Image (cartoon, coloured by chain):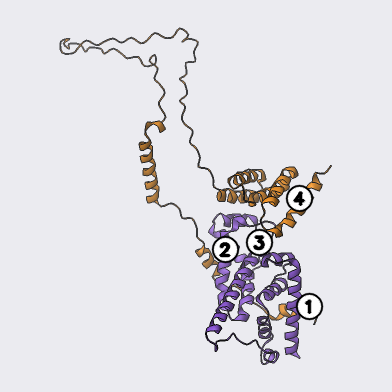
Chain colours: A purple, B orange
C-alpha cells in the first residue's frame, strides 16, 4: 500500500505548536519523520542483530527531540537534526553492545564476539540485501553511520560532520574507506 | 564498481521497512506534558493566598480613601412624635465642619484611590523562547525580538536568544541590530563547529552595512 505523499519538511506553525505541547501537532510531526528516522536506525542496528531495538530508539529520538524543540537551530533542517539525534543514539547502542561483548568474552572465553563472515559466506544462498547487511556489519559503526547518512539520507559532508561530531575531512575519509571496504566485500562475494 | 554504482546498488537492494504502525501514537502518549491544574490544587492555592494575605496584615490591603466630612455630614436624630424626652437623651446636633475657603474652586471629584498595581509574574526563559518561536512562525518578528531580548536578559550566558535575534532581525530588515546579536552569538557559542557559519553570517551583514 502506497503511503500518501507528505511534504519534505515540517511547517513552522506545526513545529511551534508541537514545541508548545499541542498533541495533534506532535502527532503530525512524528508522522512526517518517523519513516526516515526508523529506516536509519534499522539500517544501523539490524546488521549487528539489534534490529528489534530500532522501534524503541525511534521513540527515544522523538522524545529527545520534543524535549529540546526550543533549542532547535533553524540553521539546520529538522530532518537533519532528527537524524543527528538518531545516529548518536544508534552509535551509543552499538558501543554498549560492543562493551557488553568484550566484558562477556573476557569472562568466558567460549563467548567470543561473532566471527565476521568470510566473502564466500557473504554470497552463499543469500539475497542481495542479506549480503549487503553482512558486509555492512563488518564496517565500524562510525563508518556505517557515514555511509548511511550519505547514501540513504543525502546529508552533505557538513551535516554528517555535525551529526558525528567530527571534522568534514574525517567524514570524507571515512566515506571513502567505507565505500572501499564495501566494494571489496561485495565484489569478492559476487565474483 | 564506481562509488556511484555502489551507492545505487545499496539504494536499490537494501530497503528498510516503514516505521511500525501506531508508532506515532506511542510517541505522543509518551511525551511528558504539563497537566491542567486540578480543582483541588486550585482551591488549595487560593486558600494559601488568602491565608498569606491575612498573615501579612493590613499593610498589603489598600487603605480606603479618607471620607470627607463635608460629603457625609452626621444628621441629627429626629425625635419621634409622642416619645418622652426622659427616656431618650436629646440628640446632639453635630454641625458639619465649615468648608475650606477655596472649596468652590476645588475639583469636586473625589481623589482617586491609589491601588497598588498587581505585578504580573515574570515569564521564565523557556516560556519566552517558546513564545518567540510561535511569533516568528506567525511573522511577528519585532514582538518575537522583544521576547528574545527578555530571554537574553534572563540568561546572559545563553547563546540561543542571540542566535534567534540575529536571524529574526536580519529577516526584519534590521541588519545593524542583527549584527550586534550575531556578534554576541559568536562570543557565547560554545560549539566551535558553528563559529565558522556565524562568522560568515557576520561578514555578510558587515558587507551589507558597508556604504
Residue B75, percent from left and from top: 31, 13
Mark 4 or 3: in front is 4
Q: Is residue A175 above or below residue B157?
A: below
Mark 4 or 2: in front is 4
Q: Looking at the image, do the residues carrying marks 1 and 3 touch, with CB atoms under 8 Å apart?
A: no
- Kindly identify the residue that appears in the image at 58 percent across and 70 percent down: A58
Q: Which residue is mark 3?
A: A78
Q: Which residue is mark 2?
A: A64
Q: Secondary structure at mark 1?
A: helix
Residue situated in front as seen by the camera: A177 or A3: A177
Q: Is residue B20 visible?
A: no
Q: Is residue B29 above or below residue B137?
A: below
Asked if residue B60 lies left or right of residue A101, the reply is left
Residue situated in front as seen by the camera: B80 or B172: B172
Q: Secondary structure at mark 4?
A: helix
Q: Residue furthest right?
A: B211
Looking at the figure, which quarter contains the C terminus of chain B?
top right
Q: CA distance from mark 1 to mark 3?
A: 28 Å
Q: Which residue is mark 4?
A: B202
Q: Which residue is mark 1?
A: B3
Q: Is residue A104 visible?
A: yes
- What is the count of numbered marks? 4
N-terminal of the two: label 4 or label 1? 1
Looking at the figure, which quarter contains the N terminus of chain B?
bottom right
**Circle 4 chain:** B
N-terminal of the two: label 3 or label 2? 2
Amino acid at each position: 500500500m502506497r503511503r500518501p505523499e507528505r511534504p519534505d519538511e515540517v511547517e513552522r506553525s506545526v513545529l511551534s505548536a508541537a514545541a508548545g505541547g499541542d498533541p495533534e501537532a506532535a502527532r503530525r510531526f512524528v508522522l512526517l519523520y518517523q519513516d526516515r528516522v526508523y529506516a536509519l536506525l534499522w539500517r544501523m542496528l539490524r546488521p549487528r542483530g539489534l534490529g528489534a531495538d530500532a522501534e524503541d530508539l525511534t521513540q527515544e529520538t522523538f522524545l529527545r527531540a520534543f524535549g529540546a524543540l526550543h533549542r532547535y537551530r533553524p540553521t539546520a533542517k529538522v530532518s537533519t537534526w532528527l537524524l543527528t539525534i538518531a545516529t548518536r543514539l544508534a552509535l551509543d547502542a552499538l558501543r554498549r553492545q560492543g562493551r557488553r561483548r568484550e566484558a562477556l568474552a573476557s569472562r568466558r572465553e567460549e563467548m567470543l564476539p561473532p566471527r565476521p563472515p568470510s566473502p564466500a559466506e557473504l554470497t552463499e544462498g543469500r539475497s542481495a540485501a542479506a549480503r549487503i547487511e553482512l558486509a555492512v556489519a563488518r564496517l565500524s559503526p562510525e563508518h556505517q553511520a557515514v555511509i548511511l547518512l550519505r547514501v540513504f539520507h543525502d546529508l552533505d559532508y557538513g551535516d554528517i560532520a555535525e551529526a558525528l561530531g567530527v571534522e568534514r575531512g574525517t567524514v570524507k575519509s571515512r566515506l571513502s574507506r567505507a565505500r572501499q571496504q564495501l566494494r571489496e566485500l561485495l565484489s569478492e562475494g559476487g565474483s | 564498481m564506481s562509488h556511484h554504482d555502489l551507492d545505487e546498488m545499496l539504494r536499490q537492494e537494501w530497503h528498510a521497512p516503514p516505521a511500525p504502525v501506531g508508532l506515532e501514537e506511542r510517541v505522543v502518549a509518551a511525551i511528558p506534558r504539563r497537566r491542567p491544574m486540578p480543582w483541588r490544587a486550585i482551591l488549595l492555592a487560593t486558600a494559601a493566598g488568602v491565608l498569606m494575605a491575612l498573615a501579612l496584615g493590613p499593610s498589603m490591603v489598600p487603605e480606603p480613601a479618607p471620607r470627607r466630612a463635608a460629603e457625609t455630614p452626621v444628621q441629627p436624630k429626629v425625635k419621634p412624635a409622642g416619645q418622652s424626652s426622659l427616656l431618650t437623651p436629646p440628640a446632639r446636633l453635630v454641625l458639619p465642619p465649615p468648608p475650606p475657603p477655596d472649596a468652590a474652586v476645588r475639583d469636586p471629584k473625589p481623589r482617586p484611590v491609589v491601588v497598588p498595581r498587581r505585578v504580573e509574574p515574570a515569564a521564565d526563559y523557556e516560556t519566552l523562547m517558546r513564545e518567540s518561536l510561535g511569533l516568528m512562525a506567525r511573522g511577528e518578528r519585532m514582538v518575537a525580538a522583544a521576547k528574545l531580548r527578555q530571554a537574553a536578559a534572563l540568561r546572559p550566558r545563553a547563546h540561543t536568544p542571540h542566535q534567534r535575534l540575529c536571524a529574526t532581525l536580519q529577516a526584519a530588515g534590521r541588519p545593524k541590530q542583527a549584527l550586534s546579536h550575531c556578534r554576541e552569538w559568536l562570543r557565547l557559542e560554545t560549539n566551535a563547529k558553528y563559529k565558522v557559519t556565524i562568522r560568515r553570517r557576520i561578514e555578510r551583514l558587515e558587507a551589507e552595512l558597508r556604504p
